[in-house]
Image (cartoon, grey):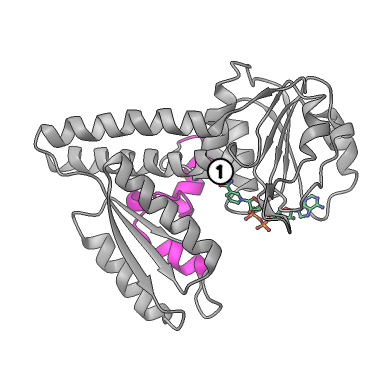
Amino acid sequence: MTAKLLDGRALAQSLQAQFQGQIAEAVAAGHRPPGLAVIQVGDDPASSVYVSNKRNTCQKVGVTSFAHELPASTTQAELNALIDACNADPSIDGILVQLPLPPQLSAAEVIARIAPHKDVDGFHPENMGRLAIRQPGLRPCTPFGVMKLIETTGVDLYGIEALVVGASNIVGRPMALELLLAGATVTVVHRFSRDLAGHVARADLIIAAAGKPGLIRGEWIKPGAIVLDVGIHRREDGSLCGDIEFAAAAERASWISPVPGGVGPMTIAMLMHNTLQAWQAHLALRV
Ligand code: NAD
């Protein structure tokens, strides 16, 4: 392997230690700790794993998490009422609704109902819009975490050819906006795009977020490219892999993020970052 590893686990741990220090200092000075409402509807097993990871991280960092586990039969009116209550609660700085939601509930309606200053996932139309017009507020966690990992390479993104594979609201689109904000020349490919191999071959930086195991072949990658893999899949033997053929890609890339241990831990670290950002803004308002 010639590529250097982008170690998301180590970076996430060091960021979390830093956040823990900031919180401990503020609490010692008499402030209340940050509060995060974590709302899960139904008991999708993957969602339960994500939610418990988020709550464990809250505990480590010193964020108070308020768990709301609602039945799968919850109505939109009931969920809206809970969000309204969290919006109004002065001890809550951030509200996270774990997606996906059961089919009777609208994720778009839920996201738009969260007060933008408590939207620590960064999915509210106001926060997405702010990112689009170069005035970022709370930023979507996964793309923000990818940017923090890229920063560790020390590579200047101005003018480089960046490729985002995937165009979802939660990863691909905000990823493209982050890269544009950083000065890259950005191409986004999605399920209707032609010639994925050709796009990959031209890119200096590749962010894969299609949710298709092994979609990106190592041999397509331009020698020296920086490669980050957002995809997460569980193989039949229980191990995890991403959208990129890791071993072959690592022979050509200059930097590569592994799955697991790359982008995944950064998403939770940036959720903590956003919760701190919201908390600091709320404390300043109340002084
Ligand atoms: P999604 O299904 O909502 O979106 C996938 C996108 O990929 C779509 O825009 C689609 O058009 C595109 N796509 C599908 N097939 C393609 C192809 N053959 N070529 C090019 N584009 C193609 O998925 P998502 O929610 O954005 O998640 C993507 C992946 O990232 C999943 O594996 C998910 O588990 C993972 N994920 C990881 C984290 C993390 O923290 N690491 C966070 C969110 C999502």
Q: Is residue 92 above or below residue 21?
A: below
Using the image as rendered, state which of residue 230 and residue 9 is in the foreground.
9
Q: Could you tell whether 217 is left or right of 205 in the image? A: right
The N terminus appears in which quarter of the rendering? top right
Q: Is mark 1 within 8 Å of ligand 1?
A: yes
Asked if one can make out residue 100 in the rendered structure from this viewpoint, the answer is no
Q: Which residues are magenta?
A: 107-135
Relative vertical location of residue 107 with respect to residue 240 in this rendering, above or below: below
Q: Is residue 238 left or right of residue 144?
A: right
Figure check: 272 above or below 17: below
- Residue ID for mark 1: 264
Q: Is residue 63 left or right of residue 15?
A: left
Q: Quadrant of the C terminus?
A: top left
From the top left corner, tell me how far across and down residue 75 is, in percent. 42, 82
Magenta part mainly helix, strand or loop? helix
The structure residue drawn at horizontal position 49% and vertical position 58%, both measured from the top left corner, is 49
Give me the residue at 63% from left, 17% from top.
Answer: 155
Structural crowding at the residue carrying mark 1, measured as other residues with C-alpha within 10 Å and reported as few (<14), some (14–19) or many (≥20): many
Residue most extreme to the left: 30
Residue 87 x/y as whole percent: 28, 60
**Residue 133 vs residue 170, the one in the foreground:** 170
Q: Quadrant of residue 189?
A: top right
